Every structure is written in C-alpha cells, then in structure tokens.
Image (cartoon, rainbow, N blue to C red):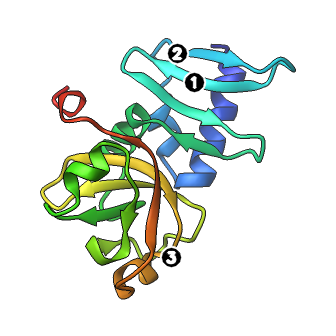
C-alpha cells in the first residue's frame, strides 16, 4: 500500500471513529492488502488477521471483525461500544442482530447508522455492525433492533 493511500485511509478512520483510529486500523509499519473496485478506488483493506474494513461508496468504512478487534484495543471504552450480557452472546457471535432489550450499556455518542463494536460485558468482541438506534435509545428501549450485525466474532477467532 502506498504511503499517500494509507494516509488517506487513516484520515477517513480518524474522521469516522475519532482521533487515533486511523493509526490503530492502518499502522504505518504493517503491510496491508488493498482490493480495488473496477474503477480503481479502494474497496477492501485486508491484513494477515483478516478483513479490516470495506470502504463504502458513501465514503465510510464498514468494519470487519479484524478491524473491530483493532479498534477495541485502540479506543478507550465506551467509545463505539454496545455492551451485551450472556443471554444474547451466542446468537450475536453467530451473526444475528442485537436487540435493545439485551443491551446493558452503550456509548451515548452513538448515532443511528454508525459502525459499532458489540462487546460482551466481560470484554471480548462479539460482533461488528451498524447501529439502528442511538446509544441512549439502546439503553432506554425494551424493544427493537439495536445493532444490525454484519459479522459475528466466533469464539475461536477471539482467542487470537
């Protein structure tokens, strides 16, 4: 990956996830593979651990579980996190959606449409996905989908 392209991806990540997210997702010292669309623009960014992000046509990233793990390690809690307990953990790991009634807490700064990390209350990443409710709404509501899960983090992959 070229330095200019890496810097551009880092800036997008910093804008979307906050300061420091770009260097967390795309460190300068790591060799990353960029898959491109037919027009030549970046489509997916992949590391040895797996898909970090897909770069959407709207200019925003869609997280992969490898990217979610990096953000979880690099961003202080509760940033971009939705916390669930034992009840829904196995279902969300499989890639099923997270519902508001199972949300124990969520970052108040989450807005509908944001990419979020779905984590267990004792820490491990369960999934990554798109928030369907605000962080406050997730905590307040007893019905409805809180997170549209894109990728579940299987228990084996979390053992990395």
Q: Which residue reaches farthest bottom?
A: 140
**Marker count (numbered):** 3
User: Which residue was labeled with disc 3?
Assistant: 134
Across and down, in percent, residue 102 comes to 27, 72
Q: In this view, does 15 lie to the left or right of 64?
A: right
Q: Look at the image and tell me whether residue 104 can be seen.
A: no
* Observer-nearest of 34 and 134: 134
Q: Is label 1 in contact with label 3 (beta carbons under 8 Å)?
A: no
Q: In which quarter of the image is residue 121?
A: bottom left
Give SS at disc 3. loop
Q: Where is residue 97 shown, x and y percent of the image?
A: 40, 57
Of the image marks 1 and 3, the number of the one nearer the N terminus: 1
The CA span between labels 1 and 3 is 28 Å
Check whether the beta carbons of the residues at disc 2 and disc 1 lie within 8 A of each other.
yes
For the residue labelled by badge 2, is the local secondary structure a helix, a strand or a loop? loop
Q: For the point 37% across and 88% down, which residue is it?
A: 140
Label 1 residue SS: strand
Q: Along the horizontal axis of the image, is 10 left or right of 124?
A: right
- C-alpha gap between disc 2 and disc 1: 7 Å
Residue at which label 1 appears: 45
Q: Name the residue under label 2.
A: 32
């Amino acid at each position: 990956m070229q330095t200019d392209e890496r810097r551009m991806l880092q800036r997008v990540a910093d804008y979307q996830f906050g300061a420091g997210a770009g260097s967390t997702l795309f460190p300068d010292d790591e060799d990353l593979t960029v898959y491109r669309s037919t027009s030549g623009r970046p489509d997916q960014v992949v590391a040895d651990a797996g898909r970090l992000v897909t770069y959407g046509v709207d200019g925003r990233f869609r997280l992969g579980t490898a990217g979610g793990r990096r953000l979880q390690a690099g961003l202080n809690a509760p940033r971009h996190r939705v916390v669930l307990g034992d009840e829904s953990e196995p279902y969300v790991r499989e890639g099923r959606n997270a519902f508001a009634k199972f949300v124990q807490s969520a970052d108040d700064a989450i807005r509908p449409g944001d990419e979020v990390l779905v984590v267990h209350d004792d820490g491990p990443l369960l999934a990554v996905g798109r928030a369907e409710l605000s962080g406050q709404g997730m905590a307040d509501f007893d019905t409805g989908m809180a997170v549209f899960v894109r990728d579940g983090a299987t228990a084996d992959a979390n053992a990395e």
